[in-house]
Image (cartoon, rainbow, N blue to C red):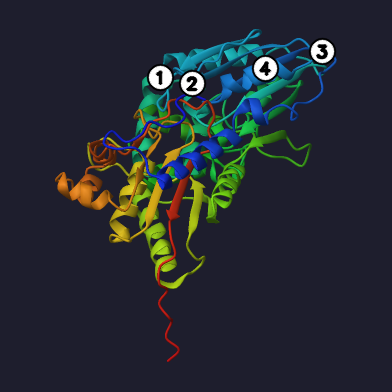
Amino acid sequence: MTGFPAKPSASAERSAQESLLLEMFQAAVGSALPQRCLPGRVPAPPLGRTVVVGAGKASAAMARALEGCWPASLSGVVVTRYDHAVACDAITILEAGHPVPDAASVEAGRRILEAVSGLTADDLVICLISGGGSALLSALPPGVSLEDERALSKALLKSGATIEEMNCVRKHVSLIKGGRLAAAAAPARVVTLAISDVPGDDPATIASGPTVPDPTTRAEALAVVDKYALELPAAVRAWLASPDSETPKPSGGTEPDCRMIATPQRALEAAADVARKAGYTPFVLGDAIEGEACDVGLDHAGIARQIVARGQPVRAPCVLLSGGETTVTVRGDGRGGRNVEFLLGLLTGLQDLPGLFALAADTDGIDGTEDNAGAIISPSSSARASAAGLSADEHLARNDAYSFFAALGDLVITGATLTNVNDFRAILIDAAHPVQEQSTS
């Protein structure tokens, strides 16, 4: 993995508590590295050919891990984000745009559909899927241009829609997502190895489920469009209005063979082990937390205050752990990401609570579109921000959390980790504080 240990603050060395938070983050990411979690999950070689395809931020690293443990010949093509390529021997690695698709995404879709065409029942397709695949893997419907798809992606990213809602729309504006890739590979057997970056680990949502029958409908996709008042290109709306936009649906037949090789829950458990060994009680709030990033931060602050004041739901010293994927409804023109926006919300809700440190970061190493994975806050964050003339509320209003933490020197920068099990959040409450007695009157 690139960049670990994370770069320290520009103004000072990390404290012991901050170093522990970074160690927990590293353990979470390490648990999901393809070379660690992919071997042992692969199917047996087929009688015929083995063709490998895939898409996502971790797909190239997954391809390299697969080559290292596969006992027979194979070929194929996968697409990953720019600067995420890993050299492979037999599998072609392509790079494309993320989070907005580009011409390379369209070429990748064409190459992958070509790779699975003309196969037989004796052949095997191994599909390597991880987060980011929705943008990286594109196959345009008739009449829809790349610029139309880019406009759709940008509108969805700014809308505040959940990942499930966004991918519901994406699946219906594609000829490769929502189970269409598996349909193109028939009658070959398809086995999907997936690294989950979505709440609930739903294989139909990860990278918009190219090998999984889609339970959502085009009517639901149009409902998402209406819910968020998305301004769609005319060609996209016309396609969604057509019955041809409907995706393959689950049937009563054989279930798709989809194997989760890494999940957010396992990443949180790895971090919990680190906390426990350091003398802190880990408390996992959940691996599938969604909502507006700032609001989720405020909710986490309320839990932290209850711990300090009441010793509930766990007594300090402890670490609160959570994962999932929050959203940011973009209203300003600042630089940000959902993890740093979460931290600003948390900071405003803590009200200078003593003895508290927190880290929030994306396990892929990129928070939104910036160069940081996330950031850290400490008991001195509010005072240092005031001394620097920084207002958390003003930066939140501009969606400019990146600039806030950059000015404090508290960004966490790791580089691309080559995996992705979604957001990681850890709140460390360092020492026990006097617990107020609850009234019995």
In the picture, measured across the screen, residue 78 lies left or right of residue 236, that is right
For the residues bearing labels 4 and 2, Cβ distance under 8 angstroms: no
Q: Quadrant of residue 151?
A: top left
Instruction: Answer with mark 2 or mark 1, whichever residue precedes in sequence.
Output: 2
Q: Residues within 10 Å of mark 4 (few under 14, many from 20)?
A: many
Q: Secondary structure at mark 2?
A: loop
Q: Which residue is mark 3?
A: 48
Task: Give coordinates of residue 122: x percent, y percent.
Answer: 83, 17
In the picture, measured across the screen, residue 412 lies left or right of residue 44, that is left
| Front one among 243 and 137 | 137
Instruction: Answer with mark 4 or mark 1, whichever residue precedes in sequence.
Output: 4
Task: Give coordinates of residue 167: x percent, y percent.
Answer: 50, 37
Q: Which residue is mark 1?
A: 146
Q: Residues within 10 Å of mark 2 (few under 14, many from 20)?
A: some
Alpha carbon separation for disc pair 3 and 2: 31 Å
Alpha carbon separation for disc pair 2 and 1: 7 Å
The amino acid pointed to by label 1 is Leu
Residue drawn at x 49%, y 22% as measured from the top left: 136
* The disc label shown at residue 208, or none: none
Task: Give coordinates of residue 314: x percent, y percent.
Answer: 52, 65
Alpha carbon separation for disc pair 4 and 1: 26 Å
Residue drawn at x 36%, y 34% as measured from the top left: 8
The amino acid pointed to by label 4 is Val
Q: Residues within 10 Å of mark 3 (few under 14, many from 20)?
A: few
Task: Decide if residue 75 is in sight here.
Answer: yes
The amino acid pointed to by label 2 is Leu
Task: Give coordinates of residue 321: x percent, y percent.
Answer: 50, 51
For the residues bearing labels 3 and 1, Cβ distance under 8 angstroms: no
